[in-house]
Image (cartoon, rainbow, N blue to C red):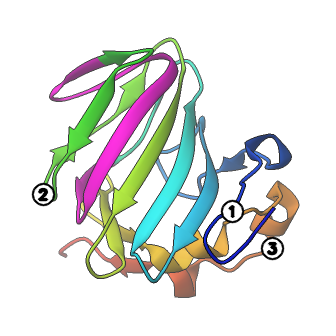
Amino acid sequence: MHSESMSIIRDADQEWLRIPLPGAEGVSIKVLKADEAMDRVVVKIRFDPGSRMPRHIHDCRAVAYTISGSWAYDEGSFVTGECAWEEEGNDHTPWSDEGAELFIVFDGKDGHYLDNILPDGTIIKLGMPILKAFEGLTQKEADSIDIEPLIEIIPAAA
């Protein structure tokens, strides 16, 4: 169902997609909605047991609700039913020892959401273009996308 004022997004109809980011092995995403007009993205994230994301800094506000399992980052840990409210500038490295599934809403101001900092100091900026491109895709479709034009890479200082 879809109208000008309402949409139903069928989570079960979407595949989990590998996050194409070094250091995010074992972490998958479903982009449920990427709304450019509101600068809001709604995703689900799944951590396999023992997985982690790269360290990142938020260029947006994020609200992360824990659907199942447990996960943690520098500021604390979360179990099923708990929520993290993350302001712009929050800097952390999320991980999960047992595995977890999260529902996250990113609210931005300029289409930028996360600056991922790789161990060598390279920064990979993720924003609306890549999240919009992955909205509702299958893994096969996602694998065919050239992500380089959709992200900004800032090489580590030499």
Q: Answer with left or right where residue 152 lies relative to residue 129.
A: left
Residue bearing mark 1: 7
Q: What amino acid type is highlighted by mark number 1? A: Ser
Specify start and end residues of the magenta stretch as a single range: 55-77
Does 66 appear in magenta? yes
Q: What amino acid type is highlighted by mark number 3? A: Ser
Q: Nearer the viewer, mark 2 or mark 3?
A: 2
Residue 89, disc: 2
Counting labels gives 3
Which image quadrant is residue 138 in?
bottom right
Query: How far is disc 2 from disc 3 in space, using C-alphas?
Result: 32 Å
User: Height in image: 94 above or below 16?
Assistant: above
Q: Secondary structure at mark 1?
A: loop
Residue bearing mark 3: 144
- Camera-side residue: 55 or 59? 59
Percent of width and height locating residue 153 = 38, 77
Percent of width and height locating residue 82 = 34, 20
- Asked whether the beta carbons under mark 2 and mark 3 sit within 8 Å of each other, the answer is no
Q: What amino acid type is highlighted by mark number 2? A: Gly
- Asked whether the beta carbons under mark 2 and mark 1 sit within 8 Å of each other, the answer is no
Of the numbered discs 1 and 3, the one sitting upstream in the chain is 1
Residue occupying image coordinates x 61% and y 57%: 31
Of the numbered discs 2 and 1, the one sitting upstream in the chain is 1
- Camera-side residue: 158 or 59? 59
Q: Nearer the viewer, mark 1 or mark 3?
A: 1
Q: Residues within 10 Å of mark 1 (few under 14, many from 20)?
A: few
The image quadrant where one finds the N terminus is bottom right
Magenta: main secondary structure:
strand
Which image quadrant is residue 101 in?
top right
Residue occupying image coordinates x 18% and y 29%: 74
Q: Secondary structure at mark 2?
A: loop
